[in-house]
Amino acid sequence: MKKMIVVFKREYLQAVRRKMFIFMTFAFPALMAALMVIPSFLMMRGLGEKHVAILDGTGKLHDAYLHPVTRTPRTDLQRMQQRREVPQAMQFDYVDHAADPKPYLARMTQRAKDGQLDGVLIVPSDALTNPESHLKYYSRTATDFISQERLSSMTNRAVQRFRLQAHGIGPDVMNQVMTEMTLDSVQLSKTGEEQKGGSANFFVGFVLCALLILPTIVSGLDVMRGIIQEKTDRVVEVLISSVTPSQLLIGKILGTAAVGLTQISVWLVMLGGISIYGAAVISVAGINLSQFIRLQTFIYFPIFFILAFLTYVCIYAIGGAACNSDREAQQLIAPITMVMFLPWFILVVLITNPDSTLSTTFSMSPVFGPMTMYVRTLVSDPPPIQIAVSIVVSIATIALFLWVTAKIFRVGILSYGKRPTIPELWRWMKVA
Amino acid sequence: MPHILAVRDIVKTFSHVRAVDGISFTVQRGTITGLLGRNGAGKTTTIRMITGIFMPDSGSIEWGGAPGGGTFRDRVGYLPEERGLYKQMKVVEQLLFLAEIKGRRAAEVRPLIDRWLERFELVEKRDAKVEELSKGNQQKVQLIGTLLHDPELIILDEPQSGLDPVNMVLVRNLLRELKDEGRTILLSTHMMGEAEKMADEIILIHRGKVVLDGPLEEVRGSFGLNTLHMEFEGDGAFLETLPQVKHAAVSNNTAEIALTEGGDPQKILEAAMGQLRIRKFELAAPSLEEIFIDRVGVETLAAEEMAR
């Protein structure tokens, strides 16, 4: 135990003192924040502004483009969508008759920035009467779906009103007919309380899973490289003559885990600091986190984070113990990584069906358990017995992995040469 | 004399090679024991089994040290043949770590570190990273790491490889000093001349088996005075072909000649005087090198050399 702590201490201090660690810990959140803030910022500054000419053959749709009726946002999702929509302003040149499009099309391709058009929308003169007629939109970029979608919906809403009016329907009735209903999502838990914010949980689930995977990969590779480094530096012979392979491995893995947790704690503290200070990042994303995250999240996150983290890092440790070079180890571990992060790839399925047979099975199986169960606790209310099973299975898995790694380590440690095959690894485990 | 370590009939096989094939020996307390043999004889594998890195396939290793006070692991100091330190660590941190994994407390080791660094003239490198040191200095740091926790048994695998002559003397004197302090040293080396200068007891191994062991003086004495050491002027190549010469190592102006059973040194001298100017002619006990060659057989060695 004492020796394990010595190894732990060395591993932790050496990693934490590295310049790269300090840089990543403090620069990474800034980088992420920049990635979130800068696009919105740019959009607000009008970088995405489009200049479109509308050639309205009906001559009646003036108000649709120059005084559009905006919907009041009802849900967080709508609020987020509008935030994204509104800053990307469109500027319209409105022509109230079926003009010859040629001069306008020429303005699209002209060199001078002044008066240049990004698109030309042609509304046919029979638009209000002929259901078969088509809108035509010319643009330099056929891929600008957002503009196309907005122009189409703005025009159609206005055209619908005129068509209804032609059938003698008054403005009051029209407003009633045209108003959309809002869907309020309510989550019912076992204890009967209602919880709002399903859509927010969806995003929080993604964010926290990403927050779990990234440090895991970084730490896992660190452990793997550390073990290989000890082998290539030949330190390992001195180490193994002083401590047992298990003491060494457990010390190393826990040390690296502590490094990862330190980093995440710093990030969470910084995130907390940011949200307290006027919530610059959060409000841009349109989510008020504190309003939607449930209390359980704070209890289950550390538990399942640590379980998932240790499971994955142990797998990397096996790779390190079996191989003699980073490259070999990467080759061995890459396909395994794909499998072990399976919950991440099917996260949408898990979040939208947290209590399905698939989710339940995954959440109680080794390796996939911690992450899946973590997602379930976030978006659903799994029975405590399942949570307990998941925790027990995970701990057993970690213990088994540590045991296997220690075995492979003892044999692999001093055998140089080519990467062992799976049957060879099996033999190593039996002889050690 | 009480032994500190008894190795009993240990065997280790790697895939199809029997690296160690039933080796037994004891290490007496307070001696320097030389584990001798050529490269690939099985020395390092034997030592790795003693230090607990490998498990023997069969046989046992018994610790005869004082009971209590930490485990066997903690009371052995081991300098591996493949040297290795954490390259990124500072010298002083590295040494502290090495002592701590041997169960010593940092506070009690710190003053010792300074004393050792002074002795090896490394004081100004105290806070340097290991990778910034010269190879020789890295070796010294590792040697300090081996001794820092005050081990009862010190196991050194080729301690002088890679050292310059000055540092070789430094290590030689250090080992004698450690012995005088009552410590036990197991010294593995292929440099038989060095072992001869230091060892009290020798264990000669070849192809995973012990071919000869015992106190150095006894071993040499049992071979009798059957070796000639000569210095001369002229071409001494013909000495190898003389009758009564078992084998001879002739180089420029010197020769070491092993006589056949009952061979008469006087006859050799007569033959030599005819062709060479003799400067020195001495009848001596054989060197370890000679003993080794005699034991294993010169033909076997030549054949093995060819097969390499």
Image (spheres, coloured by chain):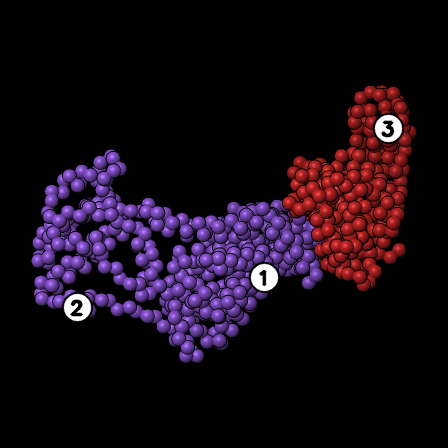
Chain colours: A purple, B red
Where residue A231 sits: x, y (%)? Answer: 62, 48
Given residues A134 and B186, the one toward you in this image is A134
Q: Is residue A113 above or below residue B92?
A: above
Residue matched to label 3: B230
Quarter of the figure with residue A161: bottom left
Disc 3/disc 2 C-alpha distance (Å): 128 Å
Look at the numbered disc 2 and give the secondary structure of its residue. Answer: helix
Where residue B59 sits: x, y (%)? Answer: 73, 59
Q: Chain of mark 3?
A: B
Quadrant of the drawing holding the C terminus of chain A: bottom right
Q: Is residue A379 visible?
A: yes
Q: Is residue B285 above or below residue A289?
A: above
Where residue B208 sits: x, y (%)? Answer: 72, 49
Q: Identify which amino acid the numbered label 3 is placed on.
A: Met
Label at residue A402:
1
Residue matched to label 2: A172
Number of the front mark, 3 or 2: 2
